[in-house]
Amino acid sequence: MGNIFVPFSAPRKGARRAEALSNPGSFDELHRKCKDVFPQQIEGVKLIINKSLSSHLQVTHTVHMSTVGHSSYHLNTTYLGDQQLSPTETFPILIGDISNVGSLSAQILHLITERIRTKAVFQTQQAKFTTWQFDTEYRGDDYTATLTLGNPDLINNLWQGLTYLPFPFSSFPFLSFPFLSFPSLPFPSLPLSLPSLPSFSVSFFLFLSQSPTLKWIATLNLGYGGAHASYYHRANDQIQVGVEFEANTRLQETSFAYGYQLTLPEANMIFKGFLDSNWCVGAVLEKKIPPLPVTLALGAFLNHWKHRFHCGFSIIVG
């Protein structure tokens, strides 16, 4: 019997790389996974009522009775368009929030093409504009480029304001490196026909992820203003922990915080707690009451260094 020879073809590295790499996401979502583990401070009594008027429009009423500051009322409206990019992404999105004193906050998110996204943010303090910001984001196969203009002077000098360009890209299956950004670009007041090189600071970002299992995510960014590092770890379906470190070279301050989240699906409860280097501890307990669409939240926060204690109670309907 004769021998059968089967030729062996080496795998193409380019195809393997294309399958392994993915888009690293946007610049604003760097530390979001870790921050979601930490509890949000609750103070006073808060009542939140969510009402869906249609499949596109949702209204939220928030009444906050504070023991420290002034009590307030907020009306929030959210509009979702018909263009659905994924089960969790729908465009366009219009969000507006107005308080009882007349302060307004609004956001507009729109998908121009499958890869280009835009966002506009406006904020007013009563009758005075305080913030207007414009973002344009381009998402490639393994990178994201974002251009941001913050508080630009559209009449006198378009470039007068805050401008930065974060550029993350994936270099390995579980590694995105570097994030290169140019924050705080104050252009001088020169005519547009006379461009000049602005002063800028460069930041490098390292993003590690065990995607798609998302068991842990480590993020680090270093820049002229300091450093920010976070680590998120999902032990199992019930326990999640997060560690965050921040250093500010301008203020000569550093802080360290540890947070955790415990989910008890059988009891419809979520418990979050944190401890930081400023001698602050806090915890929030959320409890759903089925079959009613009601969620109760209890929170307590203590600052040992400043001898301050805050506690709160929230009722969320809808």
Image (spheres, grey):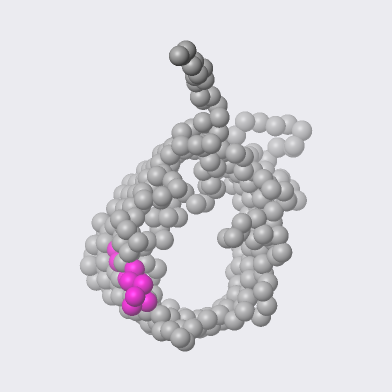
Front one among 157 and 36: 36
Q: Is residue 226 above or below residue 281?
A: above
Residue 210: tell me if it is visible: yes
Residue 296 lies, in percent from the top left, at 40, 82
Residue 100 lies, in percent from the top left, at 58, 81
The residue depicted at 68 percent of the width and 77 percent of the height is 54
**Residue lying farthest bottom?**
292
Magenta-colored stretch includes residue 286:
no
Q: Find residue 59 and report its image quarter.
A: bottom right
Magenta-colored stretch includes residue 268:
yes
What residue span does the magenta drawing correspond to?
263-274
Front one among 303 and 270: 270
Q: Is residue 303 above or below residue 60?
A: above
Q: Is residue 256 above or below residue 92?
A: above
Front one among 168 and 255: 168
Residue 237 lies, in percent from the top left, at 35, 61
The residue depicted at 39 percent of the width and 47 percent of the height is 217
Total marks shown come to: 0
Front one among 75 and 234: 234
